[in-house]
């Protein structure tokens, strides 16, 4: 019988008590990984409510009931110390850490002119700082292991960005900014850790979860016995693949995934280039060169790579 692709490997999945994180944790376990299931357990999607051990422990129990190995962690990854304790728990429990899936997040939606400083800070804190915190400790672990081994080790990071970064989201300036920052963090990490054998990639998943219930409220629900096209189970196989040895050459990439579709997003390319006929541009020359380029385009059109791919939510 062939070995499972993640057999002998250990993983952390943050925000794994519900939705996407839960589906990802179950998929990694199905593929053979021992999983540390992290979830702070607050009931509100805005990060409100009393933290609870229930969600993380329930998913860990579900994995164990299916014959897998899992440990629950209920700390807050936005807290630097607790993120370090999460990584150390994986190392202490399973001997090492091989896979890190960053998924934890909250929403505090509001238009830019109405958003408070606290609403901005809280979303950046959980999403972007949370991704940094766990990545920092995991990267240090892999660097130390690589130095001890005298060569590359096994390491995989899968970060969670969003189409809100790619196509824009008017009522989510904090969320879109955090998700854009996660892409920058991912590509920087990929360059820094590649020599140690570690890959880092980001996904933009589209799924019907507690966090997106308003976004997809108008989308048809599946019929009885049918899998929801927006089910998290459409996303989790890609995470399992990116965490596997088969994806060793996939590094520093951004992938959009939903409903049986995966799209690899290219880095931005130059669409037009203008050179001054003099030593330095003047206002008049810039107006003559650039204004005609935008003439005829819809007013207020923004840079939107996802739109080119036909991936906008509509």
Image (tube, grey):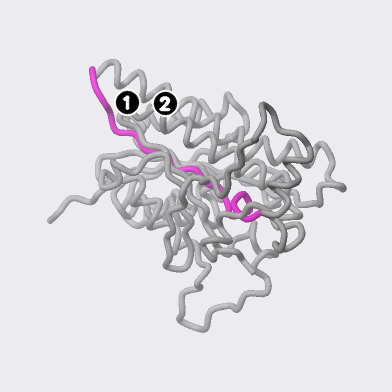
Residue linked to disc 1: 195
Determine the image quadrant of residue 121.
top right
Residue ID for mark 2: 192
x and y percentages locating residue 154 in the rendered image = 29, 33
Is residue 273 found left or right of 71 in the rendered image?
right
State the residue lying farthest toward the right.
Answer: 114
Q: Position of residue 102 (x, y in %)?
A: 50, 42
Q: Looking at the rendering, which quadrant does residue 70 occupy?
A: top left
Outermost bottom residue: 224
Assess whether residue 109 is covered by the magenta stretch: no
User: Residue drawn at (38%, 57%), measured in percent from left and top?
Assistant: 237
Picture coordinates of residue 280, whole percent (x, y) = 69, 28
In the image, 109 versus 192, the foreground residue is 192
Image: magenta residue range: 150-168
Residue 130 at x, y = what percent? 59, 35
Which residue: 61% across, 66% down? 313
Q: Could one spot residue 196 in this view of the protein?
A: yes
Quarter of the image with the C terminus in it: bottom right
Left or right of 154? Residue 27 is: right
Q: Is residue 153 magenta?
A: yes
Q: Is residue 203 above or below residue 312?
A: above
Distance between mark 2 and mark 1 Cα atoms: 7 Å
Farthest-out residue, front: 277
- Left or right of 81 in this view: 202: left
Residue sitting at x 55%, y 29%: 133
């Amino acid at each position: 019988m062939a070995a499972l692709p993640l057999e002998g490997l250990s993983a952390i999945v943050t925000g794994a008590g519900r939705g996407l994180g839960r589906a990802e944790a179950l998929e990694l376990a199905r593929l053979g990984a021992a999983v540390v299931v992290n979830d702070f357990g607050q009931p509100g999607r805005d990060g409100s409510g009393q933290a609870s051990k229930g969600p993380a422990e329930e998913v860990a129990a579900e994995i164990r009931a299916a014959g897998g190995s899992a440990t629950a962690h209920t700390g807050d990854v936005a807290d630097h110390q607790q993120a370090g304790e999460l990584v150390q728990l994986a190392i202490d429990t399973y001997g090492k850490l091989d896979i890190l899936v960053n998924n934890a997040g909250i929403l505090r939606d509001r238009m830019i002119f109405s958003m408070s400083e606290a609403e901005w800070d809280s979303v950046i804190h959980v999403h972007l700082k949370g991704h940094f915190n766990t990545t920092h400790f995991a990267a240090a672990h892999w660097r130390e292991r690589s130095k001890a081994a005298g060569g590359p080790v096994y390491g995989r990071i899968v970060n969670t960005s969003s189409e809100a970064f790619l196509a824009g989201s008017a009522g989510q300036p904090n969320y879109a900014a955090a998700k854009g920052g996660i892409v920058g963090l991912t590509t920087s990490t990929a360059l820094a850790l590649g020599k140690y054998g570690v890959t880092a990639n980001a996904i933009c998943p589209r799924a019907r979860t507690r966090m997106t219930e308003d976004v997809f409220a108008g989308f048809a629900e599946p019929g009885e016995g049918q899998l929801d096209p927006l089910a998290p189970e459409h996303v989790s196989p890609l995470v399992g693949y990116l965490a596997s040895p088969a994806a060793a050459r996939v590094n520093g990439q951004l992938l959009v995934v939903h409903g049986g579709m995966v799209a690899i997003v290219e880095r931005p390319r130059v669409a037009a280039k203008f050179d001054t006929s003099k030593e330095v541009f003047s206002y008049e020359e810039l107006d003559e060169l650039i204004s005609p380029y935008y003439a005829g385009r819809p007013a207020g059109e923004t840079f939107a790579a996802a739109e080119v791919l036909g991936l906008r939510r509509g």
